Amino acid sequence: LFRKFVLRDCLHNYVRTIITICGITLGVSVFLAIGLANKTALASFHDTVDKVAGKANLEIRPLTGRTIDQSILNRLTWLEMAGAVYTPIINDDVVLASGADHSELNELIQLLAVDFFADDAFKGYEVVSPDSSEESGAQLNGVFKHLGVLVGHALAAERNLSEGDKIELAVDDRRFEVVVSGVLTDKGTGAAYGGRLLLCDLSLGQEILGLPGQISQVEIISPPQKLELLQEKLRSELPVSVAVEPASTRTSQIEKMTRSFEYNLYALSFIALLVGMFLIYNTMAITVIRRRPELGTLRTLGLSSRHILGLILSEAILLGAVGSLLGLFCGVLIADWALQAVAMTYQRLYFSLPLDSVRLEPIILLIAFFTGVGLTTIAAVPAALEAAAVSPAEATRKMSIELNIDRWTLPFAMVALIFFGLSAYSSTLPALANFPFFGYFSALTCVFGVAFLMPAILKKLLPVLGRILYPLLGLESRLAVSSLGRTLGRSSVAVATLSIGIAMLISLAIMIGSFRETVIDWARQTLVADLWMRPASRDGGSKNARFPAELEGRLATVVGVKAVEPWTESDFEYAGMKATLGAARFDLVEKFSNLSYLSGRGNREVAALIRGKNCIVSESFSIKHGVLAGDTIEVPFKTGLIPIKVQDVYYDYVNDTGFVVVNRDFYRENMKEDGINSFAIFVKEGYEPVSVRKQIFAQLSGKSRFVVRTTGELRERILDIFDQTFAVTYALHAISIVVAILSVMNALFALTEESRREFGILKYIGL
């Protein structure tokens, strides 16, 4: 019966079948592509943390800044007596200089420096033998040569590097040349960072990064039975400016940070599946109406309602399974595009890791497949219940389901009002555990509200449209309105599907457009300096790149420079989450800058207060941690936890982790470092910014490598980043519109098939 009733009909009505399967395929493919992209990004970070940590089950890392003083190792000697071993490492990013003149800074790679004598117990290193392609674990002597580094296999393959080749690195505002002493295989540590890394001795790493006596973290292998005891003892003995935690803690922190971004992408991709549900509903409703006489015959021959229900649902499951399988294939094909679309956001905001190829996770494939089949089956339930509920006599009336829809327009409208009420109420509720559950629920109930209200809207609107269009289109308009009115149920679903897709696209465009205008206004109001200068390596993606402090004085002597405002930032942890500690000269901020504050106070008034243990925080930090003006927060510095009073909250759109900004003198005193990330340069009256930029390059380019942009150029770069961030959002909604159009095509195609007899009569009478 399944073969004759379901398969034969699907093949006979192949156009409708193809349209339906295409809608399911699109929905499943984008859902899968986004799922694979998100999973790949987080799995890459997790794998890299595991490979760098090796066998370590505990680590000591800074709570603030990028490094720990190496003298901390002197306080860990007792660990050996407790049966534990430890090793220091340096883990930072550098930029690879390429091109004929090494002027292209377009590839961020990772520098991993270890103490090879102590690190052997933690990680394994395999180096490709220079004499053959065979792998060998005994080719590490090269790292002890002058400036010798081991190169990751992927980096070596891309750059065609071999032993003896020289590599020029951009570090801070300078260049550093190293020599390839070997190539790591794709096993163990060599697989970290996607094989794009340099591995060297600890002392060379400190020399390359300009961090003498500094390390990034200490890895510890503790006996499992003593792990908690050692962790508590280390926490009690070490400064509060360091964290003593399992290596896996960083992975969980990243997962928390990226959760909102990840769920938003899932929600956007789910829209295509939701729109596809309406397409399935329409398809199955058409099937039930068109084949009602056959269903009646089957009932007359003794087939039970349960069997009729099973037949209709089996057709939906068949369509869902075929569409979902094709969706898996297409999803895998477009997953690389999705990964590249989201990679920039992950790398810019959360972690610096190469994300080049998608990992096929079986669990994600299964979830996508069963989600597609499950939603397809759910969408078919109303039509299946309708088919199973009718008696053999009623089954001879093809349009009874449409008559039911016509009678139920008022109750449906009441249900729609309930959905709209739920949507409005849900939109006012706060997030649950920082997850906007009620926001998503509000959007979903609004969608269902539109779907239930559409029959009532069309019932009132179609006669009006008929009267309006009759003078323009003549009899054809009345026939069209009459046909749509007879198929009110299917027409309502098709119109609702397209309306929802377009409404969401418009709302998205309004939201993003409004946000874009806000960013433009913020940039216009806040970025008031004439020139902006940053190290060349920072422009290449190295977030930690700094100028030496003495450059500030040299820059101030350049002809045409009125004032130089330095800016420094470092990552720190607040309430278990990543944030950014910023430092500025507020005497200059008071004179030249134009920050906007939540309180509405002027820039001069607030800036004058930021001295000593006072700060301002960004709006994102305020929202994330519930911090307001007048509150006191404890911020970790190298000298310890220091309570700082929040004087105000300022508007900022640089990152979503949030800023805490203190005065530069206070920062230098308590962070024990005076590097500078960037300069805002104000030009004297009568001088052009472009000519002053030339003077800066003429006087300083031989001593420092840097990039200088005008304010206009910086604003353009900000908007480019903004547009790239939301490109994937527009793409996902465009796909939802395509699925909605398929739903309309399906309804119109069915209407054409059903009206074939009427069309023949109209042609016969000469229309």
Image (tube, rainbow, N blue to C red):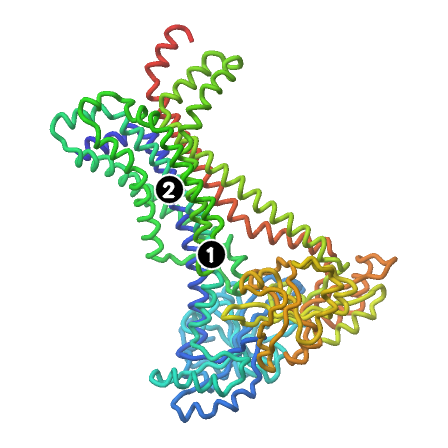
Query: In x, y percent, where is residue 391?
Result: 18, 26
Tell me what residue is drawn at x 33 percent, y 21 percent: 754
Q: Position of residue 408 (x, y in %)?
A: 34, 29
The C terminus - image quarter: top left
Whole-angstrom CA distance, mark 1 to mark 2, is 33 Å
Q: Nearer the viewer, residue 45 or 391?
A: 391
Is 557 left, or right, of 72 in this rendering? right
Tell which of 187 and 281 is nearer to you.
281
Q: Is residue 753 left or right of residue 177?
A: left
Q: Which residue is mark 2?
A: 25
| Crowd tier of the residue under label 2, counting other residues whose Cα lies within 10 Å: few below 14, some 14–19, many 20 or above | many
Q: Is residue 348 visible?
A: no
Look at label 2 and name its amino acid.
Thr
Mark 1 neighbour density, 10 Å: few (under 14) some (14–19) many (20 or more): few
Q: Which residue is mark 1?
A: 431
- In the picture, the disc for residue 194 is none
